[in-house]
Amino acid sequence: MLSTQNLSCVRGDRMLFNAVDLRLQSGGLLYILGENGAGKSSLLKILAGLLQPESGSVFWNNQNIQQDAEVYRSQLLYIGHLNAIKEDLSAHENLLFSLSIDSAIVEPALRSAQVLQALQAVGLQRQAYLPTRHLSQGQKRRLALARLWLDAISMHVATVHNTSKLWILDEPFSSLDAEMADVLASRISKHLAGGGMAILTTHQPVDIISHDIQNYRLH
Amino acid sequence: MSTGFTSIIYRDLLQLLRRRSDIATTVFFFVMVASLFPLAVSPDPVTLRQLGSGVLWVAALLACMLSLSQLFASDYADGSLEQIVLSPHSLSVLVLGKIVAHWLVSGLPMVLLSPLLALQYGMHSHSLLILVLSLLLGTPALSLIGAIGAALTLGVRGSGLLIAVLVLPLYIPVLIFGTGAVTASQTGMSAEANLSLLAASSLLALILAPLATATALRVAVE
């Protein structure tokens, strides 16, 4: 369970938001809404533990994430608005690296197969060995999102420690085509149905199925 | 722990090999400075022998600094750094992996090239050996200390100059011990004391630099 207490964020000398109290249970989906510049990305960064809030704290299973950082990070998958892709490496190499730094306990022999499966899920199997600088913007976004499928695969093979329970996604639907947007929405729905949680920002209506959908609007 | 460490070294090396010009700049700078000096200064073997170790050490130091601003810059720009910071692996260990990769492509080639370049200064085989040893023990400290500077100046405009200002004072002891070792061997004294101090600097940097760099990187991604 994720909860926050009285979060506030100051950027420069402007107060972006204050007194943000959120609570997200297993299977829950939280949309962060707001205009451009309202502080959506900053809020996501605070929730991920990348940014220190001006005041307040974030709790994961009632533990402050600053104190229990390593446990929290092993349960978290954060995809920011930057794709974190190395242009000189192929999609396969990029994802292999993500896999090895995201989760500690995957059999090396299984890794390559997992990566290929994830690439297939996002429709990049044909570009797997191409340097990613040749990919289009949308394909790069797909590659960044392929990590969501890695998460699912490691769930089947490995222990419970390996599953990310919380997904924090900053504009995951931007620059995706309609078909891929549907694939992504159903992937997130499946994650939630399996007891995961997701927090995301989006500017377009998407249909993700969850029994517990919350909206939080930043002003 | 080890998976993260080795895979970050592997990724960085792979990436640097695909962009060889970046590595070439560092090594080329080192070779150029070291080879231009004998041409410009004097052909007199006595003068050159005295200059040799100093020139090679200064060239190595500046070449290392030249490549520092690139150490974390691309990871910072494309968002990889956020993912590295959020990894469940220890950030200091991952950072050490990046520093090792940096040393392997900048420090190590300079160590390997130094005997060849030292020949231009007419150095005797014993002091040549000491020079190579001193670079082998000292260049890791340059990469380690440099990483702190690179992390502290991340995202700052004109970071190259700022790194120099931050890092140079910390490089000076390494430079003094390094050239001191060679000078000692040339004057018939033992180089052991200087080499030990050099190794000690590298070990101290090995312990402190990854921690300091990791802290600076956490601030940088905010």
Image: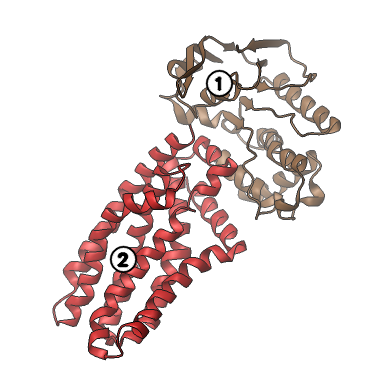
Chain colours: A brown, B red
Q: Is residue A63 visible?
A: yes
SS at mark 1 in the image: helix
Residue type, mark 1 in image: Leu
Seen in the image, is B133 located left or right of residue B17? left
- Residue visible at 72% across and 43% down in the picture: A140
Is residue A92 shown above or below A217? below
Q: In the figure, A31 relative to B127: above or below?
A: above
Q: Relative to B49, say whether A120 is above or below.
A: above
Mark 1 closeness class: few <14, some 14–19, many ≥20 residues within 10 Å: many
What subunit carries mark 1? A
Where is residue A148? Give x, y as percent: 69, 33
Which circle, 1 or 2, is nearer the viewer?
1
- Residue sitting farthest toward the front: B40
- Residue type at tag 2: Leu
The residues tagged by marks 1 and 2 sit, at their Cα atoms, a distance apart of: 46 Å
Q: Nearer the viewer, residue B66 or B110?
A: B66
Left or right of A186 on screen, residue B18: left
- Provide residue B118's location: percent of width, then percent of height: 34, 82
**Drawn side of residue A124 relative to residue A1, left or right:** right
Q: Residue furthest right?
A: A179
Image coordinates of residue A10 in percent, x first then y, are: 47, 20
Residue A200, numbered circle: none
Q: Give percent across and percent down for residue B49.
A: 25, 84
In front here: A6 or B44? Answer: B44
Residue A103 visible from this viewpoint: no
Circle 2 is placed at which residue position?
Answer: B137
Q: Residue at x 39, y 44 (%)?
A: B213
Residue denoted by label 1 = A43
Residue A163 quadrant: top right
Q: Secondary structure at mark 2?
A: helix
**Neighbour tally class for label 2: few under 14, some 14-19, many 20 plus, Cα within 10 Å:** many
- The one nearer the camera, A195 or B5, is B5
